[in-house]
Image: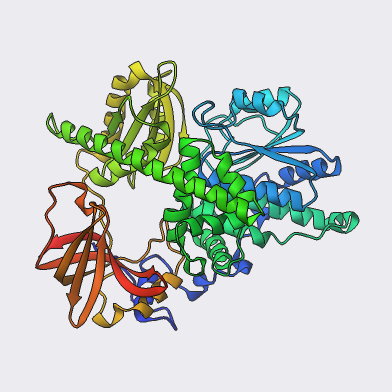
């Protein structure tokens, strides 16, 4: 399906680039200005003044501060940013704690508060979690800790009794962007704190050089892209600025080391590289072991230490891929079995005793992609509890759906939380059949009975002359591209000259259009072993990309969809 665009051309831009931007709602070149002056000010972010007052008092009293993070890349970058920024602003006692997902689960639970209490913090700050942690916050307050919640997840009907809560998605919050990731929220809190410290003369009085918080934008970019939040204009400013620092080599040694472990040159890193190269390696620590390794990699100022940790993360990511591959095959067989009965349910719930809790989210995402239907993958926990990770389709707010199920079936869900497109939940194993039926019914009520694979939108055709390196590099530099501001996809007919099978799963083609001959890649094309290699003339939906291999840069097509002509 081709995007609908207006008639007016954006002045001064390549006509194809103008068409691409207009298809994404950009009507003025001013909206493509990603300088830091375009960043929204923190003053309209609800709760930030109370948070700053709390932190200022902690600084003045030489109090100890403990961050409680989350076990994904957004939580890891948020945790690292908070620790680094507070240290630079003069906090002498700052540490962090990340719940092990297999022992404590997500968020500020009473159990993890008990672990935190052993460090005797005066102030406890959550990053990328906490807005649903009512019991945990209550316990922390009873133990004498001040609690600052920084989060971006959707709140429930009751807020925790924290000293301060900063979350742009709270009801009535006036901050114009609701798309901040967890790392974006803590970055804004640190900006507001620095402004207050400057105002009271803190840096001069203490002989501290005022920190340039832009040095942490590489972390903000990574966490924002990794968490798949919408790249509205404000987030595009954050990501573009972070990428510029990475490309210039002015990034954390840990990010540089992770890219190096993947053989990626930092000078040409894109948002896609953050999402598909750096984030999975960070996430592998939280999925399989402990996100502490990922945070330590981001915190380290020692290049060699960062490289050692990055190598461990790379090894964990390879292990994660192997586990995921087995689970994907099992999930595929389970979905195929569902077709043998009364047809495929509108909402898919899959469970296997052998599945790994840390990988169910990836499985749910792949099932969703393959079927075009919302999917939840469950893995066993302890004491008869199963934990699930849900992935939704456009038009279905998955967290709201789970809240509706919890309301109609009191006690069925032990806990749940998340976003419009992704959520997590826990329930008793013996409640799975009832939940599966309730989930399918709720999805049917919202989406109807027909819902196939999601539409793939195209930005139209490219002329032969555009299938070259210079235009591929222009498209890459025209980003950042990401969630709700997608990388350009084009569609054209090509003649297949050669085909190759790579690593058993991927398809490589040599194709021709007019006088132009170019390589094309279709990842996971041979996911079904009986998939035939294409031949003749085909219509491709594709991204024009740059293949940077052993110092040689060439244009290539990344195939999103292939259809014989």
Residue 243, position as x, y percentages in the image = 53, 64
Residue 284 visible to the viewer: yes
- Location of residue 234 with respect to 59 vertically, above or below: below
- Location of residue 24 with respect to 130 vertically, above or below: below
Task: Using the rendered view, name the quadrant where residue 4 is placed.
Answer: bottom left
Is residue 262 shown left or right of residue 79? left
Is residue 214 shown left or right of residue 334? right
Residue 255, position as x, y percentages in the image = 55, 56
- Location of residue 176 with respect to 469 vertically, above or below: above
Q: Nearer the viewer, residue 402 or 529?
A: 529
Q: Nearer the viewer, residue 470 or 375?
A: 470
Residue 481, position as x, y percentages in the image = 43, 63
Residue 445, position as x, y percentages in the image = 27, 34
Residue 169 visible to the viewer: no
Q: Tell me which residue sits at (47%, 34%) in the image.
A: 417
Task: Using the rendered view, name the quadrant where residue 220 is placed.
Answer: bottom right
Placement of the C terminus among the 4 image quadrants: bottom left
Colour convention of the picture? rainbow
Placement of the N terminus among the 4 image quadrants: bottom left
Q: Tell me which residue sits at (16%, 31%) in the image.
A: 337
């Amino acid at each position: 399906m081709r995007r609908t665009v207006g008639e007016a051309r954006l002045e001064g831009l390549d006509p194809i680039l103008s068409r691409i931007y207009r298809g994404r709602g950009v009507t003025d070149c001013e909206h493509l200005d990603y300088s830091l002056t375009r960043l929204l000010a923190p003053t309209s972010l609800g709760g930030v003044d109370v948070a700053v007052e709390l932190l200022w008092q902690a600084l003045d009293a030489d109090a100890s501060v403990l961050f409680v993070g989350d076990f994904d890349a957004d939580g890891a970058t948020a945790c690292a940013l908070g620790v680094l920024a507070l240290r630079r602003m003069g906090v002498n006692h700052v540490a962090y704690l990340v719940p092990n997902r297999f022992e404590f689960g997500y968020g500020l639970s009473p159990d993890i508060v008990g672990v935190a209490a052993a460090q005797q913090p005066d102030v406890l700050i959550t990053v990328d979690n906490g807005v649903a942690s009512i019991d945990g916050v209550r316990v922390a307050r009873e133990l004498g800790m001040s609690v600052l919640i920084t989060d971006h997840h959707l709140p429930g009907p009751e807020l925790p009794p924290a000293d301060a809560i900063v979350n742009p998605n709270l009801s009535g919050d006036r901050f114009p962007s609701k798309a901040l990731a967890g790392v974006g929220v803590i970055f804004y809190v640190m900006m507001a704190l620095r402004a207050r410290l400057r105002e009271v003369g803190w840096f001069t009085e203490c002989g501290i050089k005022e920190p340039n918080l832009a040095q942490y934008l590489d972390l903000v970019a990574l966490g924002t892209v990794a968490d798949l939040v919408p790249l509205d204009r404000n987030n595009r400013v954050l990501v573009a600025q972070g990428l510029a620092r990475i490309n210039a080599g002015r990034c954390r040694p840990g990010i540089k080391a992770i890219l190096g472990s993947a053989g990626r040159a930092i000078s040409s890193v894109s948002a896609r590289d953050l999402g598909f190269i750096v984030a999975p390696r960070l996430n592998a620590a939280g999925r399989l072991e402990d996100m502490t390794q990922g945070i330590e990699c981001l915190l380290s100022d020692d290049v060699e230490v960062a490289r050692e940790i990055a190598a461990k993360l790379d090894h964990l990511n390879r292990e994660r891929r192997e586990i995921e591959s087995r689970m994907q095959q099992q999930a595929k067989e389970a979905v195929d079995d569902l077709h043998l009965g009364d047809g495929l349910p509108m909402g898919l719930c899959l469970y296997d005793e052998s599945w790994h809790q840390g990988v169910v989210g990836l499985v749910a995402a792949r099932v969703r992609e393959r079927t075009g239907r919302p999917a939840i993958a469950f893995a066993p926990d302890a004491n008869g509890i199963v934990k699930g990770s849900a992935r939704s389709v456009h038009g279905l707010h998955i967290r709201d759906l789970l809240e509706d199920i919890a309301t109609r079936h009191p006690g069925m869900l032990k806990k749940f939380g998340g976003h419009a497109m992704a959520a997590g939940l826990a329930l008793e194993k013996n409640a799975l059949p009832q939940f599966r039926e309730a989930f399918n019914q709720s999805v049917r009520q919202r989406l109807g009975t027909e819902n196939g694979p999601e539409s793939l939108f195209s930005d139209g055709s490219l002329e032969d002359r555009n299938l070259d390196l210079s235009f591929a590099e222009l498209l890459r530099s025209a980003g950042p591209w990401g969630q709700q501001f997608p990388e350009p996809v084009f569609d054209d007919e090509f003649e297949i000259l050669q085909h190759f099978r790579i690593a058993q799963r991927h398809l490589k083609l040599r194709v021709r259009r007019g006088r132009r001959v170019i390589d094309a890649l279709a990842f996971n094309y041979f996911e079904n072993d009986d998939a035939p290699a294409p031949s003749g003339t085909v219509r491709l939906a594709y991204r024009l990309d740059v293949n940077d291999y052993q110092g040689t840069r060439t244009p290539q097509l990344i195939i999103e969809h292939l259809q014989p002509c």
